[in-house]
Structures are given as C-alpha cells and as structure tokens.
Image (cartoon, helix red, strand yellow):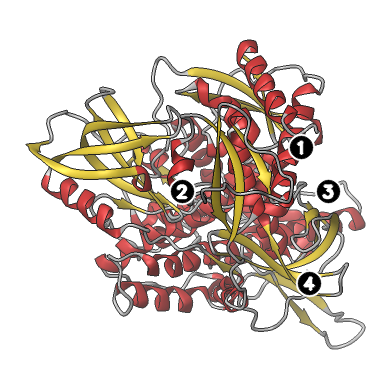
Amino acid sequence: MSASRTERLLNLLIALLNTKYGLRRSELREKVYHDTVSSDVSFGRMFERDKSELRQFGFEVETLTDKGWGADDPATTRYRIGKDSNRLPDVSLTPEECTVLILAAQLWEHAALGSAALDAVRKLQAAGGLTEAQLPAGVQPRIRPAGQAFEDLVAAMHAQHPVSFHYLAGSTGKEEERRVEPWGLGSRFGQWYLVGHDQTRGDRRFFRLSRLTSAVTVLDKQSFTPPSGFNVRAELARLAELPLQTAVVDVQHGRLLGLRKRAQPVPPAGPTAEPGAKQPDSGRDRLVLPFRDAETLGEELASYGPRVKVVAPPELVTAVRRRLSAAADFAAAPVPPIRFPDAGPAKRRHKRTSEDQLKRMLQLVPFLVHNQGLHISEVADRFGITRKELEEDLRILICSGLPEGYPDDLLDIQWDDDHVFITQDLDLRPVRFTVEEACALLTGLETLNGLPELAEGSALESVTLKLLAAAGVEGLKAASLSGPEVGPEDSGTLEAARDAIRTGAQLRLRYFSPQSDAVSERDVDPLRLYSLDSTWYLEAYCHSAQGLRNFRLDRIEELHATGRPVSAPAAPAGSFPVKLFTPNDDDTVVVVELNRRGVGLADDYYAERTAGLPGGGMLAEIRFGNPDWLPMFVAQHGGAVRILQPAALADTARDWVEAARAQYED
C-alpha cells in the first residue's frame, strides 16, 4: 500500500462515515478519487479493492439501492458506513479492572497477538474507558507462543484458510505431510496443540506444534468453515497425558548437574536398554530419566551435544539424531551474502509499513480527542514510533477530510508548540475489536485465572464480561484460542521473592546455572518477578556479577533474607515486557542464519538487525552474554539456526554438533 493509497483510503473512509444518505459511485470517483482517466471497469476494481481494505480495518461499507420510478428515473446505488455498527461500544472500567486488563494485554510478549493486544488497549484508551493503572508489585506474567508456526496458524485460523506442514506422528514415528483446517490453538500439559480437521485422514485430529518438522504453508486459495460453538479448551480437556516412560542416557563424569538432579536411582546391576546392551564408556555415568514425550526430552538432550549419549528408548535416540543431523547439514550448506540494512532496528517481516500507518492514524485521532495537549514526544512514545514518523502521520491527517474540502471539512490538528490539539475529528471514533484483538485480550484474561493474586469472582470476572459484551461476535471466536497455565510450580519461592521486593530486603540465593554447570551462592537485590508461561524469573541486582541478572525460580535451590536492606541503586531493566537478556558492553555480537521454520528466534533473542533471505529465511544479528552456550543453542534447534560470524564460534558449534552426531553413527 503506497502513501497515496493510504491517504485515499482515509479520505474515502471519512466521506462514507459522514454521509447520511450515502454517496453514488460517480460522486466518489469525482470528489474522493479525482479520477478522470481510467475506465469504468478499472475504477470499479479499484473501488472494490478499497472496500475490501476498509473491511479488514473493521469498517463494513453498506450498499443502498434506490429502485427509481421508471425509464426516466433509473435505479441508483449509494454507499455509506454506518457509524454505530462499526464503533466500539462504550466500556467503563474501574481501576482494578484496568489493572487486570493491562496484565492480560501484556501477557503476549511479542508477535502478532502482542501487536493485536496493544491495538485493543489503544482503542480502549482512545474511547476514554481505560485509565492509568498500577500493576501488582513485581508480578508480570507473559506467554511465549510456539514460534513462527504459532503465528502462521493463528493467521490461517482467523482467515479460515487450510494449512499444510510436515508432521512427525507420535504413534508411528513417521514424518508425513498433513493438510489441516485449523479450528483452534491451545496449550495443554505445557505444550501447544493445533486442533482441526485433517483433510488427509478425513477426521478431527490433534497436532503438537513441537512435532512440526517444517514451516507452515497457508493455502490462501482455499477456505473452510469451523464447526459452530467450537471451544478449543473443551477439546483439549479430552486429551489424556502421555504415559510416563524412562530413558537411559550416558553422561560425562561431573557434568550436567541439572540432569543428574532429575535422574532416578539406578539399580545395583545397572539398567539395560535391551538384552546385550553395552555398559557406559569409560568416563561416563549411566542415568535413568523419567519423561513423557520423546520430542521434548530429545530437544534438551540434543543441546548437550557430546556430553550425553542416549541409549534407550529407540524413539528418543531417533529424536536426538534427527536434530543433530539437521543441525550438521544446515551448518554445511553454502553461506549466503551477509548484508544488513544500513540502520534501524529489526522489523518483523510480515508487516507492511503503509498498512500499519493507516491503522495507527485511525487510532491516533480518537486518542488525541481524549488526550488533548499531550507533548508530541509523549504521543510518539505511546504509539512506539519516532517523532518524525508521528509528524508524517499528522501531515497526512490535516490534509484529509470530506470531499468538498472546505476548512471545516478537514481534520483540524495543531502541534506548533509541541503540544498536540485536535478540534475537528470528523467522527473518527475507535472501531470495534478485530478477531485478533478480541482473542488476545480474552485469552489473556482467561489465562490470568492461574495467578494466585487474581481470584475468580473479582475484577477478573467483571472485566471479562465487559470485554465480551464490547467484542460482540468477534469475542465468541476467542474460544478458538486457549493459553497455558501461568501459575508458578513453587508458590513458596514466588511469595518469598515478592515479600522481599515489597519490603526492600536483600536475598541470598543458592542457584544452579546450567551454562556454567555449577551451583553458586549470590547476594541479590530483588527488583521484580515475571514469567514465560509457567516458568518464573526473578530480576535482581547481583552483587557477585555487579549487574542486573535474571534467575529462574525453579533453579533456586535455597532462598532466604540476609537481614540487610537492598543496597545497590539499581532499577529494573527498561519497561515491560522484561527481556530475559540484559545487554552489556562485553557481549558477543553474533550473526546467525535462520531458516523459515526458525525466524521466530529473531524475536525470542531480541535481534538488533535482521535481513530477509530467499525462501523465507532470515539473517539476524544478536547479542549473547555467554558465547560458550552457543553450540548448545545450535544443537537444540536442530537445523533451524546456524552461526555465520564470528567464524571461530561457527567452527566451534559445527565441531560440537559433529562430535555429538558421531556418537550415533553405529
């Protein structure tokens, strides 16, 4: 969408919103499009495309037909947009409800639903229904969707397009292509599942996203209709948890303490995978590990590279070998040219700037109506753009208005003294929620039920009912998405950390670090708690490291107050969402290549620059605090990522993967 088309769509929208009886196509062609050269057929195509574009932004164009009285008075067709049918209903929220709603919106760390949640909040702010809220002290839960596949499936699900992907069946162990009508996505037993109609099998099926072995392809030339009243949470409740199994692995002496803590006692005679199985090599210990899913454990064990060798069962051996082989093959592929844009942060590849600009301007006008006189820099910050980008938006807006173009027919916005005022808004009010926005907020509210601070029957329940009423039919579609549990596994550690944050008490931690494979004691000043799904983190100033660090609560073996108050003048790193990684001057800057299946890692690891590659892949420049961990990172993601620069790190990762794969060559 070009800038001229953005301005044209805005003028078309204003014209159709501000006509009581509708405008004929000839009037629109003359006064809005200023079209005197194209044929009627060409103009008709352009007009239909623009109507479709407005529909995607939530505006339905009504068609009114006057039959006429005879040959001298032929039928005429007029067009308009009904203001009430497209407008977001008034939503009045209490401060407690605002707090819960903001928490729900911030659950989505990034990606498509993160943007949708932010857009929904801006609409509520623009309508005057959302006030400033104080978030609970130190608690900020988040959901991390399952990579790029999650985004592609959500987009296909809402657009009602089938998808295709390669899938590793748990029952047969075979990899096959599947064509599926995506009905819903949800989390169960700590895993994301797709529920839909398998066109290949002709029946309803469940697909674990961790078993997808290829990128998702959206079949946008086809469509489907989901079953009426479908609820993905109810569907997933029928799933039984996988049975508990045991794995036999050989681990290097003195390594992988975290794995050893989960191991079961080994019988005196030692476990055997099958009759005649070999005993562990010299320098290794045999461990027995409980597990439920070979793919989940296989991803972890593959990351340990040559430090661990899987003995049994065969499906776990296969899962590890497949990842290591894919990583080795990707590392050996030809290296593409490494070129990044000259400047600017990484941009998500599925966004188109002009579409974002129009959507932003439609949010900007009602926002300014309810926030008169804000400084222009504050307005830009609220919308996550630069002052230059905001001024470009405002210049387009002040040139937009009704077809006649008289002074009172244009949007009137002034910012000469750096404070922005609007005196003529031409009825641009917040439009109703899209299905993505409704899903993001309502799924987030449902997910918050797992937090001990938010009990059912309180503000959580009341704000959910208000949002359901405001979302209307789009809110019913939120049943197609269900989030994971965000409640902590160890509520005692969480509460102790929360108390320390509230009282300003220093803590002493006994902490296991998997990167150093060691346990250490730290004195820390706790700052805040946050989560990714059910995994909780404590952000604190570490006196040993003399900097901000993030500690996983499930790796804290002991925690108690030192009896001293916090002493370091530290503050949480930036605003929400919290980053799992705090950049430092001595970080290693690494260039990685991501294939189409792994492009979501650029967001997960906060890439500073990205560049697209043919076939849907991506180059990404990422900071890492501990480069020793990078070979594990490459092996874990099994062919989705490889290191290109620095060359020494690329060689180290390649050797690590090859040494691990060589263990299984027999």
* Between discs 4 and 1, the one toward the N terminus: 4
* Between discs 2 and 1, the one toward the N terminus: 2
> Which residue occupies the foreground of this view, 263 or 359?
263
> Which residue occupies the foreground of this view, 565 or 462?
565
- Give the residue pinned by disc 1: 616
Please determine whether, in this image, residue 106 is positioned above or below residue 598: below
Q: Could you give the CA–CA distance between mark 4 and mark 1, rounded to whole angstroms?
A: 27 Å
Left or right: where 311 falls relative to 215: left
Q: Identify which residue is drawn at 64% across, 25% down.
A: 592
Q: Nearer the viewer, mark 4 or mark 1?
A: 4
* Between discs 3 and 4, the one toward the N terminus: 3
* Between discs 3 and 2, the one toward the N terminus: 3
- Give the residue pinned by disc 4: 197
- Give the residue pinned by disc 2: 262
Q: Nearer the viewer, mark 1 or mark 3?
A: 1
Q: Secondary structure at mark 1?
A: helix
